[in-house]
Image (cartoon, helix red, strand yellow):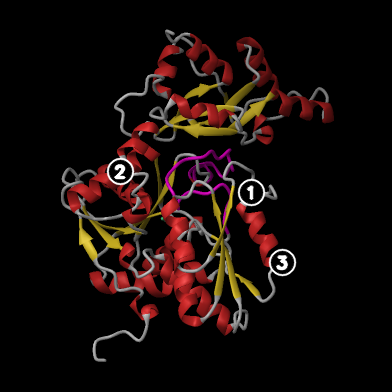
């Protein structure tokens, strides 16, 4: 019939771009959002799924009776299941346990098998969702691992579909593209396309606090990741699909601001989007605030819909019990802790310092690990154990520069980070470094946290 699509796969793409008005009223730049949640599977991952499947068919990796296996936080699964339904493939999806019930039920509704794995384990752990996926691929006959974290067809989907569509819709009148960073497919694929179209085009990546991208981009170090609530963005490893070189600026956001922004987008702008969309818009607004009076056209990609988070971000009870609605947390924030220990200045070594002077500093202040900075910016950490190991191999070499011993066994937070979160962070990291606009403004050890908590009135 005239006007109908041949099947649901043909309905992927051509999503609208809408201007934000209220939440952006205070910035000079215009911020527009691309509503990828209006894709038939509910997210931009429909485009990725379609491109991955077409590419695998072309290469003879997928055929009649095949089973597609993927580690997915939900959206790629919905896309694969939808395209798979039309092309006749079975699907098995492996998901981390922090994902919303709606996402799990959605995948089951498409007829897929869903396997849930614990989030709080190392990626190498046999229970992690990466390892479980590998095992299932080995054990399932005629299976195809779509592998969105390493499959070049993922960023290519955005290079061939999302970005050219966006460019055409706007007549190329975009200066800045802003997106959350998960597998990196969106930012790498779109970023590459836009940069090929316009010299000086700016690509802004948004990363949640707890993920390792931000520190890696700033310092080249893989610091300790820790868990956070916003779904779909941030990673605890570097996926092969992420091209960090394409990013001009990276903005860090916390769960609370992501969720509050998501609620504002729905309530004030009628944009029914999910948590990573709130994150991306919060990041874009931060970027626009930094531009001051300079006016740019910024387009933000909104990956998925509010529908999947109704029992979380849009449930006041859930928001309150996780401390995202209260004005104040009785334990306070990192800023309060730093205030309480203000009498003690930050003890840090500098790049180029000799081991002799670093050991002297550590002895003088009675500390077992020390941050190393360069022009006020954190470049790493040195601990007693690093010094011990080095001196065992090189006894007496006290004029060695500290730079070669610097390691990344720390986590970074901002002054707004809740004290409650430090407990989880210290499970993995030796030390917490507090950064404000990339400058090191404080250092917190376990004993600092103990002292702070002990000083609270019962
Ligand atoms: C809800 C949501 N937002 C953002 C992203 C990140 O996009 P990308 O993987 O292209 O970096 C994902 C990826 O799974 C997602 O599911």
Which mark is on residue 307?
A: none
Dot 1 alpha-carbon crowd within 10 angstroms: few under 14, some 14 to 19, many 20 or more = some
Mark 3 vs mark 2, CA separation in Å: 45 Å
What secondary structure predominates along the stretch shown in magenta? loop
Splitting the image into 4 quarters, where does residue 418 fall? top left
**Are discs 1 and 2 less than 8 Å apart at CB?**
no
Q: Is residue 130 above or below residue 81?
A: above
Q: Is residue 282 magenta?
A: no
Q: Tell me the CA gap for discs 1 and 2.
A: 32 Å
Residue drawn 47% across and 59% down? Answer: 74
Disc 2: which residue: 286
Which comes sooner in the sequence, label 3 or label 2?
3
- Which segment is the magenta one? 214-239
Residue found 54% across the figure and 31% down from its top = 424
Q: Position of residue 169 (x, y in %)?
A: 25, 72
- Image quadrant occupied by the C terminus: top left
Earlier-in-chain disc, 1 versus 3? 1
| Mark 1 CB near ligand 1 (8 Å cut) | no
10 Å crowding of disc 3: few (<14), some (14-19), many (20+): few
Q: Badge 3 is on which residue?
A: 138
């Amino acid at each position: 019939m005239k006007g109908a699509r041949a099947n649901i796969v043909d309905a992927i793409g051509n999503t609208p771009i809408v201007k934000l008005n209220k939440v952006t009223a205070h910035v000079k730049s215009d911020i527009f959002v691309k509503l990828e949640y209006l894709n038939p599977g509910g997210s931009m991952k429909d485009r990725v799924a379609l491109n991955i499947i077409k590419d695998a068919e072309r290469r003879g990796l997928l055929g009649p009776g095949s089973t597609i296996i993927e580690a997915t936080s939900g959206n790629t699964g919905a896309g694969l299941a939808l395209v798979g339904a039309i092309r006749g493939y079975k699907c098995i999806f492996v998901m981390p346990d922090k994902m919303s019930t709606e996402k799990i039920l959605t995948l089951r509704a498409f007829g897929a098998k869903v396997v849930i794995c614990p989030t709080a384990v190392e990626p190498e752990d046999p229970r992690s969702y990466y390892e479980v996926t590998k095992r299932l691929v080995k054990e399932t006959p005629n299976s195809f691992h779509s592998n969105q974290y390493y499959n070049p067809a993922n960023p290519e989907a955005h290079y061939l579909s999302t970005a050219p569509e966006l460019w055409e819709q706007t007549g190329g009148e975009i200066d800045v593209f802003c997106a959350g960073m998960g597998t990196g497919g969106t930012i790498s694929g779109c970023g590459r396309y836009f940069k090929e179209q316009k010299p000086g085009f700016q690509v802004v990546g948004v990363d949640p606090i707890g993920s390792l991208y931000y520190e890696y981009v700033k310092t080249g170090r893989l610091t300790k990741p820790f868990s956070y609530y916003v779904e779909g963005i941030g990673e605890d490893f570097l996926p092969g699909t992420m091209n960090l070189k394409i990013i001009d600026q990276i903005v860090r956001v916390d769960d609370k601001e992501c969720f509050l922004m998501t609620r504002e987008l729905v309530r004030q702008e009628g944009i029914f989007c999910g948590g990573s969309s709130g994150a991306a818009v919060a990041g874009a607004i931060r970027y626009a605030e930094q531009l001051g009076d300079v006016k740019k056209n910024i387009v933000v990609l909104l990956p998925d819909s509010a529908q999947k988070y109704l029992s979380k971000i849009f449930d006041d009870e859930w928001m309150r019990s996780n401390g995202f609605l209260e004005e104040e947390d009785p334990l306070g924030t990192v800023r309060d802790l730093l205030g309480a220990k203000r009498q003690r200045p930050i003890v840090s070594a500098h790049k180029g310092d000799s081991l002799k002077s670093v050991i002297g500093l550590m002895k003088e202040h009675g500390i077992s690990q020390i941050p190393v900075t360069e022009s006020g910016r954190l470049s790493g950490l040195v601990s007693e154990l690093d010094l011990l190991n080095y001196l065992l191999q090189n006894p007496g070499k006290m004029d060695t520069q500290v730079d070669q011993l610097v390691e990344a066994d720390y986590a970074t937070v901002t002054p707004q980070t809740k004290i409650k979160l430090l407990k989880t962070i210290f499970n993995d990291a030796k030390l917490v470094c507090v950064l404000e606009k990339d400058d090191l403004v404080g250092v917190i050890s376990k004993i600092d946290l103990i002292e702070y908590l002990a000083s609270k009135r019962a």
